[in-house]
Image: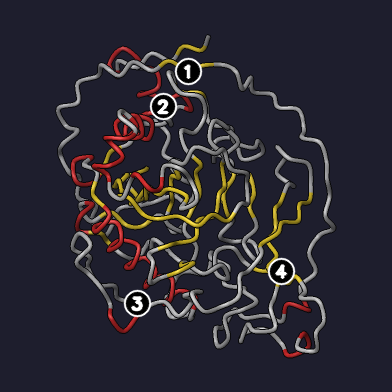
């Protein structure tokens, strides 16, 4: 089993493990999407393609004769570089869920080339998941997605999270720019801070970022700037992550570090650590990670590397969304007055603790669900 270093609030830097995907001197890559299946069904998949370039060392030499660059299928998890420009601190972010929307799209860690699919809950595995509108919010508060080439290892017990293990996914990111993005968009972002969520007992860091081309980007560099320019957003974000699963019958979430927002320096340390975990993963050095598909088309020397010419993606389809049984205009009201004396206590997760594959898939038991008065949770839908 791979061993991982501990991060110390951004002071952890692996000097000999810097990313080799800095694109300062490389051609621009264009990412496009191909969609199959009806949106809002479990058959819907969004695959990624990248326009290759003659100057790209990882591509074949067939395009060096003045021919038009061709698009090759890629994995957004493994083939999109973490950095757009490492020297400038500009990262890539993959948007999964646009702001104000509710369809729980996410990169599939188990399917070949990791397309975006719609999540389900274990209690309703045959139904695509839509996150309820938690009053006073509408869907997700930000453009929500992940940072490619990162991985929160379920084998690593984070000391800053009371020993909780990673959630087995790429690092999540919340982009706070003014423009509503689209699912599958690849953004260039700068890091502002981070919040340590404990979702169903798993470490699930939330990195706060902003699109570098957004008008807000020139005004914010750290979480203190966000509080000044976007007053209330940090607290609303913490509130949303604490309670968003309750209308679905799950427990409220807890936080690492007492729910404190950490700044950019700490966030960069966490990102670097998770990039190191991903590197060991994609090199096939992590035992017990068979549920993560490592197939890629650009990472030479990795066990999952496949010839892009051998990949056959489903035909691109422009299909109308399926009807949704859930009323997406309903609002869920949750009583937040429950005694939170234990909120600041940090739970220690030992070696025998269990985790679930699905995000936050920890449902209350029947006795707890029947004892709404004891929980002081009021679930009313208007």
Tags 2 and 1 in contact by the CB under 8 Å rule?
A: yes
The scheme the figure's colours follow is secondary structure
Count residues near mark 2 (Cα–Cα under 10 Å), then give few for <14, some for 14-19, many for 20+.
many
Residue topped by disc 3: 2
Which residue position holds label 2? 246
Which numbered disc, 2 or 3, marks the residue that appears first in the sequence?
Answer: 3
Q: CA distance from mark 2 to mark 1?
A: 9 Å
Residue furthest to the top in view is: 382
Looking at the rendered structure, which numbered label has been put on residue 73? Answer: 4
Q: Residue at x 31, y 12 (%)?
A: 373
Q: Is residue 252 visible?
A: no
Asked if residue 265 is positioned above or below residue 308 in the image, the reply reads above
Q: Earlier in the sequence, mark 2 or mark 1?
A: 2
Dot 4 lies on which element? Answer: strand
User: Could you tell me if residue 335 is visible in this image?
Assistant: yes
Residue 287 x/y as whole percent? 43, 75
Specify which label sits upstream in the sequence, 2 or 4: 4
Q: Quadrant of the N terminus?
A: bottom left
Choose mark 4 or mark 3, whichever is in front: 4
Q: Looking at the image, is mark 2 or mark 4 nearer the viewer?
A: 4
Task: Check contact, mark 2 vs mark 3: CB within 8 A.
Answer: no
Secondary structure category for the residue under label 2: helix
| Dot label at residue 332 | 1
């Amino acid at each position: 089993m791979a061993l991982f270093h501990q991060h110390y609030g951004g002071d952890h830097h692996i000097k000999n493990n810097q990313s080799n995907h800095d694109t300062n001197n490389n051609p621009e890559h264009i990412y496009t999407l191909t969609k199959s299946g009806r949106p809002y069904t479990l058959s819907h998949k969004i695959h990624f393609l990248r326009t290759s370039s003659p100057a790209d060392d990882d591509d074949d030499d067939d395009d060096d004769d003045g021919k038009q660059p061709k698009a090759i299928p890629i994995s957004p998890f493994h083939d999109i570089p973490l950095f757009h420009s490492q020297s400038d601190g500009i990262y890539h972010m993959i948007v999964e869920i646009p702001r104000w929307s509710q369809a729980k799209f996410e990169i599939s860690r188990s399917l070949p080339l990791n397309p975006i699919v719609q999540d389900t809950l274990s209690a309703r595995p045959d139904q695509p998941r839509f996150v309820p509108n938690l009053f006073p919010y509408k869907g997700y508060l930000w453009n929500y997605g992940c940072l490619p080439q990162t991985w929160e290892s379920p084998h690593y017990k984070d000391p800053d999270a009371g020993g909780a293990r990673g959630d087995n996914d790429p690092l999540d990111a919340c982009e706070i720019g003014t423009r509503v993005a689209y699912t599958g968009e690849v953004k260039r972002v700068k890091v502002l801070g981070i919040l340590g969520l404990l979702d169903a007992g798993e470490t699930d860091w939330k990195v706060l970022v902003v699109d570098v081309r957004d008008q807000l980007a020139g005004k914010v560099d750290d979480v203190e700037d966000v509080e000044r320019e976007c007053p209330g957003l940090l607290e609303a974000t913490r509130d949303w992550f604490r309670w968003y699963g309750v209308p679905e019958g799950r427990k409220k979430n807890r936080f690492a570090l007492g729910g404190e927002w950490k700044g950019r320096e700490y966030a960069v340390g966490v990102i670097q650590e998770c990039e190191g975990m991903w590197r060991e993963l994609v090199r096939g050095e992590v035992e017990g990670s068979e549920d993560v598909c490592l197939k890629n088309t650009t990472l030479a020397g990795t066990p999952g590397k496949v010839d892009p010419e051998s990949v056959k993606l489903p035909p691109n389809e422009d299909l109308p969304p399926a009807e949704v049984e859930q009323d997406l205009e309903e609002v869920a009201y949750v009583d937040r007055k429950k005694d939170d004396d234990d909120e600041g206590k940090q739970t220690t997760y030992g070696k025998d603790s269990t985790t679930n594959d699905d995000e936050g898939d920890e449902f209350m038991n029947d006795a707890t669900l029947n004892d709404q008065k004891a929980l002081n949770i009021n679930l009313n839908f208007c």
